[in-house]
């Protein structure tokens, strides 16, 4: 089975990916699409080797070549290009017989089978988050299941805010990176508004195959990890009992051969610490701006319109 995490940036997808990858039933590989998009630029796997030189990914490419009816490079490049939001209208409106999208669905299944063969696990997890790709999988990849991951937009915007200061005016949007200290307010408004728009697109995609989508709130995963993982396992029909046992014992989670995604993937192993998601402050003006851009969906997802808890730290201008 191909399992895909769909949602918005800074929603906790990397940690959910790593946690699920510690199950004996699920192999997590990080952000497959964005990671493979940097395969030829020297980007590294979580193991420290470049993706091209990593023995794990070399074995995946070999398994893919042995079974797929098309070249790895063609499947990789077309998958990376398609995931961009500019292809959303085409993906939503295409007929079921659309050859290009049927190719992408088959390519995704081939990626999953090659990774599963190398990992020795039956299910493969991709945490790329791109809604366009999630909708394609729901429409054209029958063996795919989707986790729609949501998080309180104020926490997501706080992460954008912290990165803006930590990296000298840094902001990433639509695959482009910007460094402009004078653009704090516009950038933060875009971050908040895109949370609403992106999740609305995810909800639209859910309508194509509601039985194959499970919505997960990051806050619920933090508050009751065992119960939430059990619910995810039941929704996907994937056994996660061994993972739940590890989590309840507080065992560190080894990180596999993840590509793309948050920089924590290079840490080797991580402990699931929900309090880390509350480590950054959000100024009152920015909290109000986020309310203004996000309140309808916040209410729909069960987020109360009340001030955030007191933060642990505040980012300082760098």
Image (cartoon, rainbow, N blue to C red):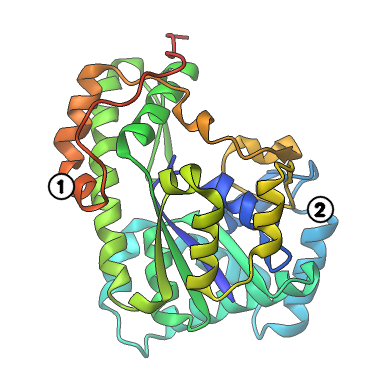
- SS assignment at label 1: helix
View extreme (bottom): residue: 97
> Is residue 297 positioned above or below 67 on the image?
above
Give me the residue at 50% from left, 76% from top.
Answer: 144
Establish if 278 lies above or below 63.
above
Quarter of the image for residue 186 reads: top left
* Residue plotted at (24% across, 57% down): 200
> Which residue lies under the disc numbered 2?
54
In this rendering, position of residue 201 left or right of residue 264: left
On the rendered structure, is 51 left or right of 8?
right
Q: In this view, does 247 lie to the left or right of 279?
A: right
Viewer-closest of 22 and 251: 251
What percent of the width, then of the height, locates residue 304? Answer: 23, 39
Q: Nearer the N terminus, badge 2 or badge 1?
A: 2
Is residue 12 in sight in this rendering?
no
Name the element at disc 2.
loop
Mark toward the viewer: 2 or 1: 1
Q: Quadrant of residue 20?
A: bottom right
Residue at 68% across, 57% down: 243
Q: Where is residue 271 in the image (x, y as percent from the top left)?
A: 67, 38
Between the residue at mark 2 and the residue at mark 1, the CA separation in whole angstroms equals 45 Å
Above/below status of 281 relative to 171: above
Q: Mark 1 points at which residue?
A: 296
Q: How far across and down, in percent of the image, does residue 302 sit?
A: 26, 48
Q: Residues within 10 Å of mark 1 (few under 14, many from 20)?
A: few
Quadrant including the N terminus: bottom right
Residue at the image position 69 percent from the left and 75 percent from the top? 122
């Amino acid at each position: 089975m191909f399992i895909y995490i769909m949602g918005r940036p800074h929603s906790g997808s990397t940690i959910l990916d790593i946690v699920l990858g510690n199950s004996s039933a699920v192999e997590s590989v990080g952000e497959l699409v964005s990671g493979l998009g940097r395969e030829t630029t020297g980007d590294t796997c979580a193991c420290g080797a470049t993706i091209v030189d990593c023995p794990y990914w070399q074995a995946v490419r070999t398994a893919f070549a042995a079974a797929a009816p098309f070249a790895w490079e063609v499947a990789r490049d077309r998958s990376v290009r398609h995931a961009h939001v500019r292809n959303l209208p085409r993906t939503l409106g295409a007929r079921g017989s659309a050859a290009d999208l049927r190719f992408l669905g088959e390519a995704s299944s081939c990626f999953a089978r090659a990774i599963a063969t190398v990992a020795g696990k039956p299910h493969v997890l991709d945490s790329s988050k791109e809604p366009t790709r999630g909708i394609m999988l729901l429409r054209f990849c029958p063996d795919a299941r989707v986790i729609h991951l949501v998080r309180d937009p104020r926490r997501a915007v706080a992460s954008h805010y912290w990165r803006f200061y930590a990296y000298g005016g840094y902001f990433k949007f639509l695959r482009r990176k910007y460094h402009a200290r004078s653009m704090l307010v516009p950038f933060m408004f875009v971050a908040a508004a895109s949370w609403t728009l992106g999740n609305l697109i995810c909800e639209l995609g859910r309508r194509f195959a509601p039985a194959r989508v499970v919505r997960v709130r990051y806050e619920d995963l933090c508050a009751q990890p065992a119960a939430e993982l059990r619910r995810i396992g039941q929704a996907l029909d994937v056994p996660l009992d061994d993972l739940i046992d590890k989590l309840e014992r507080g065992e560190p989670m080894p990180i596999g051969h993840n590509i793309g995604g948050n920089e924590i993937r290079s840490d080797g192993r991580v402990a699931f610490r929900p309090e880390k998601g509350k480590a950054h402050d959000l100024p009152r003006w920015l909290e109000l701006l986020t309310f203004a851009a996000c309140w309808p969906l916040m209410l729909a997802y069960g987020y109360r319109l009340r001030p955030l808890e007191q933060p642990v730290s505040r980012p300082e201008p760098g």
